[in-house]
Amino acid sequence: MDYQVILEEINNEIKPYLNQGKVADYIPALSQANSNDFAMSLQLLDGTSYHVGCSDLHFSIQSISKVFTFSLALDIYSKAIYNRVGHEPSGNAFNSLVQLEYEKGIPRNPFINAGAIVTTDSLISHHKSSLKAYEEIESFISSLCDESITFDETIYKSELECGFRNVALINLMKSFGNIDNDVQAVIKTYFKHCSLMMSTKQLCRSMLYLANHGTDPITNITHINEPKAKRINSLMLTCGHYDASGDFAFHVGLPGKSGVGGGIVALIPKKMSLCVYSPSLNKQGNSLVGTKALELFTTKTGLSIF
Ligand code: GLU
């Protein structure tokens, strides 16, 4: 299969959709993104990679970081992590407060904001330091993509100034006893890893271990064991796109995780990882063109998991 030709075709076919969504502006610094930007990368288990568009452009990974924080927390705590965060789709918006009140401060899954705030808190407890926890997250992702990455100070500060709902979520969870550390320290660490800047090339590379049941196929390093990698991938399929997770599975048919920065990562087990970037979002906060591009990819290649 000529993946480069397929990526070029997709790059042409998505053009009419580029301005149909809306760039996120509830974090003011994110609104600076250019809605005409598009990039798509894929990497096979043997390391061969294919790219189209601005695949070196660094964008804010936002909720894609939730995959990595959950991976670290699951590795450390194993099943005990599920006492604090569930594994069911939420059917609600990424920053919803309602369900959390009904369910006594236990978020539905680690891929909604509340869930990732809990996994972040668990990493701070493990390291007994918010700085060390952040450093571990940053160095874990850097090692996965074999390049050093860092967060964007402007986006971080913008979230800190305007992240009112996240502050509400963390305080609600604290009131139910599901946040162990200082709320300021936890929320700052959460915003920092959301503000990490990466390209589709780097994100694609960093997801390859999950496409290979937890072991990086190029370095042979096992980052998480196979049963746990299975759980992470299952959760990406059922919960990776908030209340549009069913829609993404229906149209694309791959485990994936989106972020409001406009990125989406996805994978085909035992075959490849993918990443697409386009900052205009659909109503549920997922990249509109990114979703379309991945749908075109699985349609053209027949490579969905179903
Ligand atoms: N930092 C964002 C927030 O907490 C993440 C949301 C997302 O990417 O979906 O609102």
Image: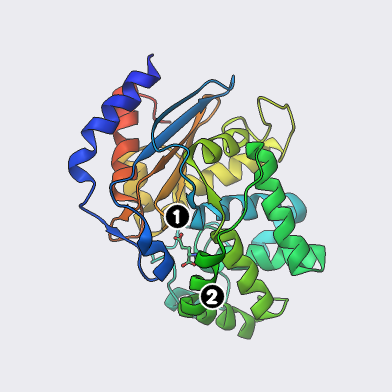
Secondary structure of the residue carrying tag 1 is loop
Q: Judge left or right: residue 31 versus residue 120.
A: left
Q: Residue at x 58, y 83 (%)?
A: 171
Q: Which residue is mark 2?
A: 160
Callouts 2 and 1 close, C-beta under 8 Å: no
Q: Which residue is mark 1?
A: 259
> How is colour applied across the structure in the image?
rainbow
Closer to the camera, 24 or 223? Answer: 24
Q: Quadrant of the C terminus?
A: top left
Depth check, mark 2 against mark 1: the one in front is 2
User: Where does residue 163 sit, x and y in percent of width and height?
Assistant: 48, 76
Name the residue furthest left: 16
Is the CB–ligand 1 distance for label 1 below 8 Å? yes
Q: Residue at x 74, y 32 (%)?
A: 221
User: Where does residue 241 sit, x and y in percent of width and height?
Assistant: 41, 53
Q: Quadrant of residue 55?
A: top left
Closer to the camera, 39 or 96? Answer: 39
Q: Quadrant of residue 133?
A: bottom right
